[in-house]
Image (spheres, rainbow, N blue to C red):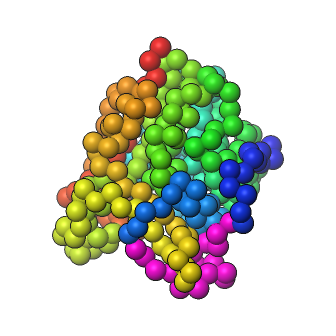
Amino acid sequence: MEHIIQAPETDPRPLAPAAGSPETDETTATRRAASVTESSRANRGWWNGNADDYQREHGTFLGDDRFVWCPEGLDEVEAELLGPAESLRGRDVLEIGAGAAQCSRWLVAQGARPVALDLAHRQLQHAMRIAEEHGTRFPLVEADAGVLPFRDGSFDLACSAYGALPFVADPVRVLREVHRVLRPGGRFVFSVTHPLRWAFPDEPGPEGLSVSASYFDRTPYVEEDEEGEAVYVEHHRTVGDRVRDVVAAGFRLVDLVEPEWPDWNTQEWGGWSPLRGYLIPGTAIFVCERDS
């Protein structure tokens, strides 16, 4: 397996300690502004500190040979949002916010040439370990999605299953970078928490079915340490915001998929659950193309 390629740091300060790590005392959840730099720094620290727990909790559901778009369990084999599986052979594909690179491993099995990129070194260590166990080879790159370390027109396709975009303060910057590294006619598909969910408590039970906040409040969700430093950040965009972001970056929106909760999926994943999934959407998947 190739080693992890590290792009130059955009923020030279030490990483923020991850929420729940030994270095972190009590954290407080709030809604406040969070800059590009603060968001990137906090989330790099959080995912480095929580990667082990995340993979233990969700690794089985995500699988070693599946491409799962969302907690609903929508599989790329079924959805074909990147195109029919047979069309992926020989295609250069960038996975953004790859985590343990489950999607990239599936792409390799289809004959594609993926590159898995993530902000968190620890997540990519999991990707390396699992790839070595399965005898799979593909590049792993540690970098910020807002500054992609690739030449213009390097990829045929790009994908991101809940990676990067929910956590960045400037999504258009990321989308423009993806547009830049795609070849003419290239497709970018990304999934995020459905914007409607921001109006509801993030709870899987009945308490998560009553509106508690304004859908139109774009103030980021921030977890702070005792000194007021952000250790985790998520950014809210309305559906209209996401569409405008896609267009502003030069993409054409081809489809907007809202996966329905399937009967076979009985698991709870954070605020996702069968109870809520049957009633309100939990995921939005944007299918975008760069014009030829």
In the rendered view, tell whether residue 289 sits above or below residue 211. Answer: above
In the rendered view, tell whether residue 291 sits above or below residue 173. Answer: above
Q: Position of residue 270 (x, y in %)?
A: 40, 68
Q: Residue furthest top?
A: 292
Q: Position of residue 268 (x, y in %)?
A: 38, 67
Please give the name of the residue rendered at 18% of the width and 70% of the height, measured from the top-left corner: 210
Which quadrant, please, contains the N terminus? top right
Q: How many marks?
A: 0
Q: Quadrant of residue 243?
A: top left
Task: Give the left or right position of residue 3, taking residue 259 as reference.
Answer: right
Q: Position of residue 68 (x, y in %)?
A: 47, 47
Please give the name of the residue rendered at 46% of the width and 23% of the height, measured from the top-left corner: 290
Please give the name of the residue rendered at 27% of the width and 42% of the height, measured from the top-left corner: 240
Which residues lie in the magenta part?
15-30
Please give the name of the residue rendered at 33% of the width and 69% of the height, measured from the top-left corner: 202
Predominant secondary structure in magenta? loop
Please indicate, yes or no, whether residue 184 appears anywhere in the rendered image.
yes
**Residue 231 is a magenta residue:** no
Q: Quadrant of residue 121?
A: bottom right
Please indicate, yes or no, whether residue 109 appears anywhere in the rendered image.
no
Residues 25 and 80: in front is 25
Q: Quadrant of residue 32?
A: bottom left
Q: Position of residue 124 (x, y in %)?
A: 69, 54
